[in-house]
Amino acid sequence: MFICPVCKTENETLLCKNCGFDGSCDFENYATLSMVPENLKAVSSLKYERQKMLETYSLCPNCGGYTFYLNKKDFTCVCANCNTPLKDTYFVNGLFKDNFIKNNNVLISNKKEYRRISAGLNHTVVVLRNRRAAAVGDNEDGQCNVDSWKDIISVSAGNSHTVGLKSDGTVVAAGDNSHGQCNVGNWKDIVSVCAGSFHTVGLKRDGTVVAVGWNAFGQCGVEGWRGIVDIAAGDSHTVGLRRDGTVVAVGNEFNGSCDVKDWKNVTSVYAGGMDSAAITRDGKVLTTDGKEKEWKNIALMEIGSFNIAGLKNDGTVIVRGSNDEGQCDVGNWKNIIDISVGGFHTVGLKKDGTVVAVGGNSYGQCDVESLEDKNNSF
């Protein structure tokens, strides 16, 4: 709970709903970071400044752990597994998740709570540095009509729809709504959002989950979930990570996509196509088809229609699956901080804000030069 120092209003986020005071700034005389004189250093600017440093710690350098505690007083990070402090690291992104608080620290993961790039079936979406969104590719259903979005901190692309998470915990959507997958206008207190092929899933601050859209296989049947800390949406199934490290799944069980009941000590979950995957506390990779067990030093994963990709701790990427369109040709990628896999293409976001893409480009989904231009401008 954040009590605004200006109007004393109680808020669930760091942005005051009454007067607009930006609680991530420690200068009470300035309502937003943009108002702070350039010769002063606000906590906000420090956090943004240190974001790239945190991104270099995809895994703990001591034990390989993937989850960190954020000290709310000085914004330093400590590995949740071995308590190793990560020097000169700060956590940045809009919402401090109160349900993750432990010993006055905030449990965080440098993973995918805030996705800055996402690949749909035939389109690509990115979050720009000014918290706007941009997209290229197939726009037959309006799934690329995101230019008007503001205050976006995360995006997720489905087959023909796109969803964006705003800094105030609300969600916006564009594109195909034939199954109601874009009916997210009344969602609040959302901390993570995922788009499946024709459904959308949101993780709420209190650990519950909401879902809308196509439900032919029960993939939206998440109303009873509690204590969830991570979510993922596949073609027709949904996966959730419980606070105790176990995993739950609902929906289409084809190819064993929901066979996750024996997974333990998990820190992040992934879903796509008819597959599910997870990374455990000790860095092991789990998949429902068992083919990635030997992958090592994986920071995060992504699953597309016919491919599965892993972002390694050193910023390189590996992709397994169909390569009919060249979507696995990522051997020369370096300094990658986020990845996504679409129908027949793979995209990556580099530390410098540029975007790379390989694979099918029949709809212009790999024409990412324009996204690079926007991502490097304000």
Image (cartoon, rainbow, N blue to C red):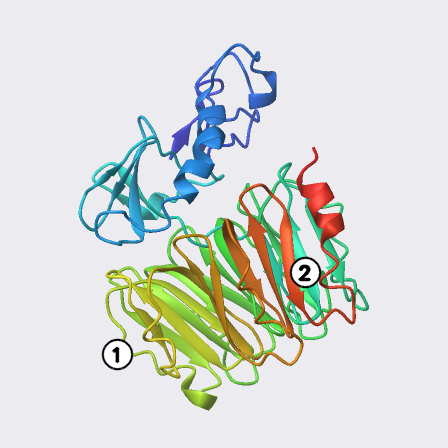
| Mark 1: secondary structure | loop
What amino acid is found at the position of numbered circle 1 in the picture? Asp
* Residue 364 percent coordinates (x, y): 78, 64
* Residue 237 percent coordinates (x, y): 49, 78
Residue at figure coordinates x 58%, y 77% from the top left: 305
Which mark identifies residue 262?
1
Q: Nearer the viewer, mark 1 or mark 2?
A: 2
For residue 372, above or below residue 48:
below
Say whether residue 13 is visible. no
The residue positioned farthest toward the right in the image shown = 140
First reached walking from the N terminus: tag 1 or tag 2: 2
82 with respect to 272 (left or right): left
User: For mark 2, does the 10 Å Cα neighbourhood hold few (<14), some (14 to 19), or many (20 or more) residues?
Assistant: many
122 with respect to 285 (left or right): right
The residue positioned farthest toward the left in the image shown = 82
User: For mark 1, does the 10 Å Cα neighbourhood hold few (<14), some (14 to 19), or many (20 or more) residues?
Assistant: few
Residue at figure coordinates x 36%, y 68% from the top left: 278
* Rendered-image quadrant of the C terminus: top right
Front residue of this view, candidates 368 and 257 = 368
CA–CA distance in space, label 1 to label 2 = 34 Å
| Mark 2: secondary structure | strand
Front residue of this view, candidates 71 and 287 = 287
Residue at figure coordinates x 56%, y 48% from the top left: 350
For residue 68, above or below residue 292:
above
* Residue 26 percent coordinates (x, y): 43, 19
What amino acid is found at the position of numbered circle 2 in the picture? Thr
Front residue of this view, candidates 235 and 320 = 320
* Residue 92 percent coordinates (x, y): 45, 37
Say whether residue 249 is visible. yes
Residue for badge 2: 124
